[in-house]
Amino acid sequence: MTVSVPYSRAGVVSAAEAAAATPSQRPRLGTAIAGYFKSRAFGWSIVAILLAVWQIAATAVTMPELPPLSAIFTEWHEQWASGELSAALLDTLKVAAIGYALATLLGTTVGFLMGRVRVIWAAAEPPVELLRQIPVTALLPLLILYLGIGDQMRITVVVIVASFPIILNSFAGARSLSRTMRMTAQTFRLSWLQTQIEIGLPSALPFILVGMRQALAMTLVMAVVTGMLAGNSGVGYFILQAQQVLNVRALFAGIFTVAAVGYALNLVFLLIERRVTRWRRIGAAED
Amino acid sequence: MTAIATTQIGKIYRSLRGASVVALSPIDLHVERGSFVSVVGRSGCGKSTLLRLVAGLEQPSSGLLEVAGQRVRQPPDSVRYVFQDYAQSLLPWKTVGENIRFGLRHAHSHSDQARNRNNWPALIEASLAEVGLSGAANRYPSELSGGMQQRVAIARALAAAPDVLLLDEPFSAVDALSRIQLQDLLLRIWRTRKLTVMFVTHDIDEAIYLSDRVIVLGPNGIGIVSDAEIDLPRPRDQVTTKSDTSYLKRRREILELVMQTH
């Protein structure tokens, strides 16, 4: 889940390391090329090349199952302008947003309290571990039976799937609170609630965010897939429909939309995460 | 006047196998108000346990503890504690200024000046100046060296205007030169604020240099084996005090005692 964390920011870089990494002479062409291969620009170039190959190949040879990118883009634009695709996307995002918010609330509360209150851990650990083993697909028939095929069922699926990574990481974060930090709270006579809010949650936050990011990817997948299975709404249904009428261009338009939205959501998440955990990346000064 | 008084205070832990482990045999200890008392001894002698008991961080298995004439049931407002592990004691997600603000918010102070939030920015800057860190309020602890972080922890403790300062090996994770500076800083603060200080260390030189009184705890929690007055003149100086013949005599006596009993 850490592939999109920029390499240099994966750990805290101390001032000494940063100084050591800065070359004394002006950057030469060789260093610029090495820098390119170590940055994400390299990967984006590969994507661009693959798309170019696709465009050229699909234009040269007419294949109904592989339309040229330009045709896909035209189709995408039409579907978007007609409101077909945009409405489907909005529907998927609505389910994703509600489900994700509920999963975050539930996951953080359950996971954090499991880590801080022994009785809650004792009560919650067995059911959580049991439920975690069940593939959500196995629950689907039951959920459809109980909740129908509407938003309620879709949101429930998102909550079930997205809660677990948040529970597990919040638990780990709550457990990571050091003895010294707990005693610090004690010397300042913080109440139990104050200790959790002022010390427990902030110190667990980096863990909680890791869980939330894992959950974010699952959320979008589940919001799309449930639309497909229930067969009535969202981008998933849009893609399914395109397949049924053999509109391959619309099919690709739907897939690309999901990829772009997923990428954008992850990017936004990373920006927020960097902002709220800024203190973790500041290196130690030398004596 | 007595600032800290313990009567047969002791601590017994129950090990995982159910056996009783004596962390500290019952001891009597009276610390005069305004004095600087150090507790030395090897690891496992119970010196940190004693300090945590005095701080109200742990409940004694036996005995009575009084701070400023009041029986201790929870960490007293007039007592502040400085931990060895400053990186875990300061809140790393808060800036230096916010850490001290945290200290003020939870000071439970009776002084009107400290209660009024409008005074806090000035109080924060004043306590940073007191530890020689003027202008560092907006930096994060991780941007500071170990010695500077421990200064912030001391400033946060002082922000609550305590009468008693308890320090548990506060300078042992700091490099030697910073340690010397911190020792003199602590002496200056102790004198100007008229604090009562209880200082736990395994460094005998540090204990003698700083203290009015050095208490040696024996191994395995057996209790006090020596309680020596240090009558070296004040203010003390890192060079002249440490070459004073009476300093060297004291050092020899305590070192011999620690070597014998351990």
Image (tube, coloured by chain):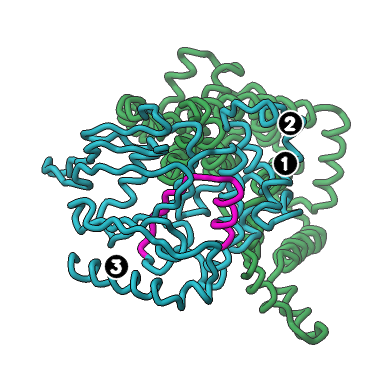
Chain colours: A green, B cyan
Evaluate if marks 3 and 2 touch, with contact meaning CB atoms under 8 Å apart: no
Q: Residue at x 72, y 35 (%)?
A: B120
Q: Please state which amino acid type lies under the numbered disc 1.
A: Val
> Taking A23 as reference, is B188 left or right?
left
Q: Is residue A199 magenta?
A: no
Q: Please state which amino acid type lies under the numbered disc 2.
A: Leu
Evaluate if marks 3 and 1 touch, with contact meaning CB atoms under 8 Å apart: no
Residue of label 3: B254
* Residue B202 position (above or below residue A86): below
Residue of label 1: A261
Looking at the picture, how far across and down is residue A212, in whole percent? 57, 39
Q: Assign a secondary structure to mark 1.
A: helix
Between marks 3 and 2, how big is the CA–CA gap?
Answer: 78 Å
> Taking B96 as reference, is B28 left or right?
left
Circle 1 chain: A
Between residues A268 and B108, which one lies in front from this camera angle?
Answer: B108
